Amino acid sequence: MWLNNNVTDFILLGLTQDPFRKKILFVVFLLFYMGTLLGNLLIIATIKTSQTLGSPMYFFLFYLSFSDTCFSTTISPRTIVDSLLKEATISFSECIIQVFTFHFFGCLEIFILILMAVDRYVAICKPLHYTTIMNRRVCGILVSIAWVGSCVHSLVQIFLALSLPFCGPNEIDHYFCDLQPLLKLACSDTYMINLLLVSNSGAICTVSFLMLMVSYVIILHSLRNHSAEGRRKALSTCVSHIIVVILFFGPCIFIYTRPATTFPMDKMITVFYSIGTPLLNPLIYTLRNAEVKNAMKKLWRKKLVSDDRK
């Protein structure tokens, strides 16, 4: 389909065309990306090396940090480089790859958040059967299903992107390739494709968010039967999860569940969930989790001891 298109490259208009503002964006995006890498890779290293973080919750947190790292990497490095260029261009093939990877890791994050909610439900509502239900084999299968589901979702996005005919206009009013800005460049009626986009991305975001909110309401309701200490610990964990869910799903639902109309705030909202949320997630999970903080301290001490021996 796309071989018949007249467009081989796209021009990314970015967040601004003002040279001074682009330099500010370069600094801000670079700091955000470095913070995202540092925070998420630290969580990955801590969980991988710590003997105390072997529960399913941290198994899923490992994959959440991994998906956050990859999700941010699909956008940030290119955006950082593009902010230094007078005109940022991206080939059609690179654009399609970016659409695939962005949606793949974004969808993977959604599914991992659902698995984390399932884990908390079993741990709090069925504590006696927790180790039997959420064993390592089951967790591995669930994560594998999440990967397959993310791949299916992304392939649908690619199919929709490749079905768009481009006849001339090639300026994408965004800082990366996604279906919404590409729809505006297509030289045909995009009503059906937009409908499929809403039923795919929009439905995944909305249904997943509602499922997560219902599950956490059930979990919080069941805490009445727990001891004060148990309630405090479970509440602390659930609040962290709920904050992450709201920060990620709020912008996603706003962007992907409406007709093909754009608002001036769209790009800034996309910045929040594509670049801001991956930075905030490790802060939320570490600042509110004593076990992760203690494991990080132990990892840091080991590093200092090994450096001293050298």
Image (cartoon, rainbow, N blue to C red):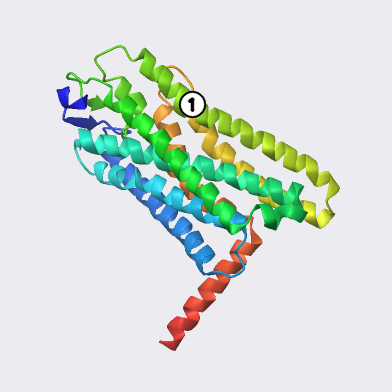
Q: Is residue 255 visible?
A: no
Residue 133 falls left or right of residue 195: right
The image shows residue 181 at horizontal and vertical percentages of 33, 25
The image shows residue 97 at horizontal and vertical percentages of 28, 39
The image shows residue 247 at horizontal and vertical percentages of 55, 39
290 lies above or below 189: below
Q: How many marks?
A: 1
Direction bottom: furthest residue: 309
221, 2: nearer the viewer: 2
**Which secondary structure, mark 1?**
helix
Q: Write down the quadrant of residue 195 in the picture.
A: top left
287, 51: nearer the viewer: 51
250, 31: nearer the viewer: 250
Image point 35% across, 27% down: which residue? 179
Image point 60% across, 62% down: which residue? 292
304 lies above or below 150: below
Residue 160 falls left or right of residue 110: left
Residue type, mark 1 in image: Gly
Q: Is residue 19 visible?
A: yes
Q: Which residue is mark 1?
A: 202
The image shows residue 135 at horizontal and vertical percentages of 62, 57
Q: For mark 1, does the 10 Å Cα neighbourhood hold few (<14), some (14 to 19), or many (20 or more) residues? A: many
290, 189: nearer the viewer: 189
Question: Can you say which quadrant of the picture contains the N terminus?
Answer: top left
Question: Can you say which quadrant of the picture contains the C terminus?
Answer: bottom left
Residue 177 falls left or right of residue 146: left
Image point 47% across, 49% down: which residue? 279
Q: Write down the quadrant of residue 3 in the picture.
A: top left
291 lies above or below 87: below
